[in-house]
Image (spheres, grey):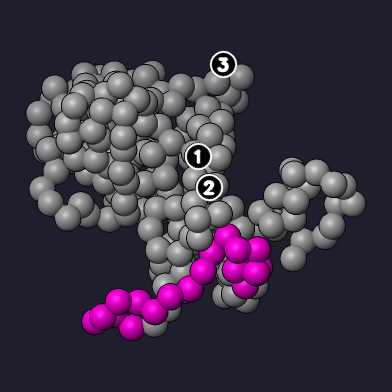
Amino acid sequence: MSKDYGQFCGISRAAQVLGERWALMIVRDLTVSPRRFTDLHEGLPGIPTTVLTTRLRELEESAVITRRAAPAPARGVLYELTPRGHDLQPILDALGRWGAEAMDTPRESEVVTDSSLAAALRSAHRPDGPAGPLTYHVRSGAASAWATTCGDEVTVGPGEPSSDPELTINAGPELRLLLAGTLTPEEALASGDVTIAGSRHLLEEFSRSFHIPLSSSTP
């Protein structure tokens, strides 16, 4: 567990649980779906197994996550959020929006993962969308995620959706510019940096339903 800050304060208590390196990333991935240890390790490039083991133990001790047996025919243990852990989802979504406002293109060492893409879509979702449901499958480089919208609600997941999506979007870093609105759907398609399988109208609907602007102070 991280060091005691010596203050009787909610933020200091939260920092004790979530302030250690990789803790927020682990919780982010578990807000998308329950994961096995190997799934978490593969989805968090660069995390040492010893650190992942330690963070999982600390998060379990803090009642943020719990373990259960994976359903048949799978084997092993699944890590998932407790109700207290699920309370962190809107907080992480807000943090994701705040951080994304200062992002335009990835740094050389940065990658997009299935879970980070799914979490980004959830953070970017705006209420008052079409009645739906509409399912979007988004590929950004090697990462793949899906989002199903229905009015104010959105459900996301890593990888391929379980049913045929209404729209599939293939993009690289340009996806961030599309979400920011600095690249219009027409411009994205015309450039060839974004390709779709489905209606152009749905790409316009996607850009209205998922939006995180760039901060005016973005470097």
Quarter the N terminus occupies:
bottom right
- Crowding at dot 2, Cα within 10 Å, few <14 / some 14-19 / many 20+, comes out as few
The residue identified by callout 2 is 87
Badge 2 vs badge 1, beta-carbon distance below 8 Å: yes
| Image mark for residue 216 | 3
Image x and y of residue 150, in percent: 23, 33
Q: Secondary structure at mark 3?
A: loop
**Residue 205 image point, x, y percent:** 22, 23
Image height of 84 relative to 183, above or below: below
Q: Is residue 139 visible?
A: no
Q: What stretch of residues is rendered in magenta?
A: 57-75
Residue at 51 percent of width and 69 percent of height: 66
Question: Mark 2 belongs to which amino acid?
Answer: Asp
Do the numbered discs 3 and 1 sit on residues whose CB atoms are within 8 Å?
A: no
In the picture shown, does residue 152 fall above or below 15? Answer: above
Where, by quadrant of the figure, is residue 52 drawn? bottom right
- How much space separates mark 2 and mark 3, taking CA atoms? 31 Å
The reply, left or right, for residue 81 in relation to residue 196 is right
- From where the camera sits, is residue 20 visible? yes
The three-letter code of the residue at mark 3 reads Ser
- In this view, the residue in front, 127 or 196, is 127
Disc 3 versus disc 1: distance between alpha carbons? 24 Å
Residue 25 picture quarter: bottom right
Residues packed near mark 3 inside 10 Å, few (<14), some (14 to 19) or many (20 plus): few
Q: Residue at (22%, 44%) from the top-left corner?
A: 137
Q: Quadrant of residue 133?
A: top left
Which residue is denoted by mark 1 in the rendering? 90
